[in-house]
Image: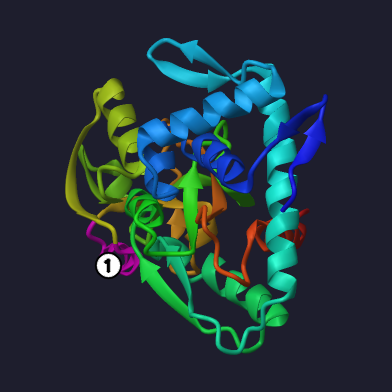
């Protein structure tokens, strides 16, 4: 792709833009380097060159971390559009036959609702596309993206982050499976996702601050296991609202800790699959949001 002339300076190669967006999405030069298969020093040099070419400071110190300046945030929009157009052009000349399988990572709790919707949209675009699914929690899937083991990942992010393309807004909900008496126990029995889940930490921290006694009966990364235990009356749990099925009932006990809002997003590997680029991720995001719009 030829360089783009901006303010009489040549800007900017695709690899540097990929590294820049990888930093924006991950918030870390370390992870950006892993995702783009470069050293952290090489990524830093790319960012320095972008600053020289734009003539603007793109980063500022925020304590011990780097954050984007106003000019850096402006560049994000341009960089995403440039990458989307570049990848879309390459995809236009690719054919689904003979393409490698698309490797998608998805947390187990979203495999029943979000993942099928995503696959349906992908197969509408590419009927011959082959898909492989890896189930793991969001942190594990981020590592898989960093290591080049998957092409796409359905992730949970905090609402104030830039990572990925939004698929759905969600929130945590306290639930039981037809055993309301569990809410009245002096020591609440809990069935939760693993400790690195935001809902787990919010539930535990909130109960501790209230002085409420509790015990974690089971912590698991498996939505199937958690729902099975809840249906057996082993405890109350915390799930994303989009994953609650007809067997589960929101808890009605007052003063249970408030649970956080989260965003479900689609993250794309910095070196995308030939058919499913950032442009396709944007298209999927728009379609899935339109399906859930009130």
Residues shaded magenta: 222-234
Any part of residue 258 in sight = no
Question: What residue is drawn where x is 62% and y is 22%?
Answer: 51
Residue 198 figure quarter = top left
Please state if 135 lies on the left or on the right of 235 as rendered.
right
What is the magenta segment's predominant secondary structure?
helix
Q: Secondary structure at mark 1?
A: helix
Q: Is residue 247 magenta?
A: no
Q: Nearer the viewer, residue 254 or 136?
A: 136
Q: Is residue 226 magenta?
A: yes
| Residue 111: x %, y % from top left | 46, 69
Q: Which residue is mark 1?
A: 225
| Residue 136: x %, y % from top left | 33, 61
| Residue 179: x %, y % from top left | 33, 58
Residue 213 figure quarter = top left
Any part of residue 136 in sight = yes
Question: What residue is drawn where x is 37% and y is 34%?
Answer: 40
Examine the rendered structure and indicate whether residue 55 appears above or below residue 274.
Answer: above
Q: Nearer the viewer, residue 220 or 64?
A: 64
Question: What residue is drawn where x is 65% and y is 56%?
Answer: 278
| Residue 246: x %, y % from top left | 50, 69
Examine the rendered structure and indicate whether residue 101 appears above or below residue 252.
Answer: below
């Amino acid at each position: 792709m030829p360089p783009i002339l901006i303010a009489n300076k040549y800007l900017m190669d695709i690899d540097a833009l990929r590294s820049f967006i990888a930093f924006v999405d991950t918030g870390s030069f370390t992870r950006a380097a892993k995702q783009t298969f470069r050293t952290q020093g090489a990524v830093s040099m790319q960012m320095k060159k972008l600053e020289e070419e734009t003539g603007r400071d793109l980063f500022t110190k925020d304590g011990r971390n780097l954050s984007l300046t106003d000019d850096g945030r402006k560049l994000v929009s341009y960089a995403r559009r440039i990458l989307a157009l570049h990848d879309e052009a390459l995809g236009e000349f690719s054919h689904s036959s003979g393409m490698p399988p698309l490797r998608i990572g998805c947390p187990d709790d979203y495999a029943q609702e979000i993942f099928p919707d995503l696959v349906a949209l992908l197969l509408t675009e590419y009927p011959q596309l082959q898909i492989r699914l890896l189930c793991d929690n969001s942190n594990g899937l981020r590592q898989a993206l960093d290591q080049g083991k998957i092409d796409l990942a359905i992730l949970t992010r905090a609402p104030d982050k830039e990572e990925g393309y939004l698929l759905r807004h969600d929130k945590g909900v306290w639930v039981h499976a037809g055993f309301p008496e569990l809410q009245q126990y002096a020591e609440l029995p809990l069935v939760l996702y693993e400790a690195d889940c935001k809902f787990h930490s919010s539930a535990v921290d909130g109960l501790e601050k209230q002085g409420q006694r509790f015990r974690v009966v089971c912590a698991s990364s498996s939505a199937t296991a958690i729902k099975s235990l809840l249906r057996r009356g082993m405890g109350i749990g915390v799930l994303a609202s989009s994953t609650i099925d007809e067997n589960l009932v929101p808890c009605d006990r007052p003063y249970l800790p408030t649970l956080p809002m989260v965003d479900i997003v689609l993250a794309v590997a910095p070196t995308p699959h030939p058919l499913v680029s950032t442009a396709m991720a944007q298209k999927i995001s728009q379609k899935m949001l339109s399906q859930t719009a009130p």
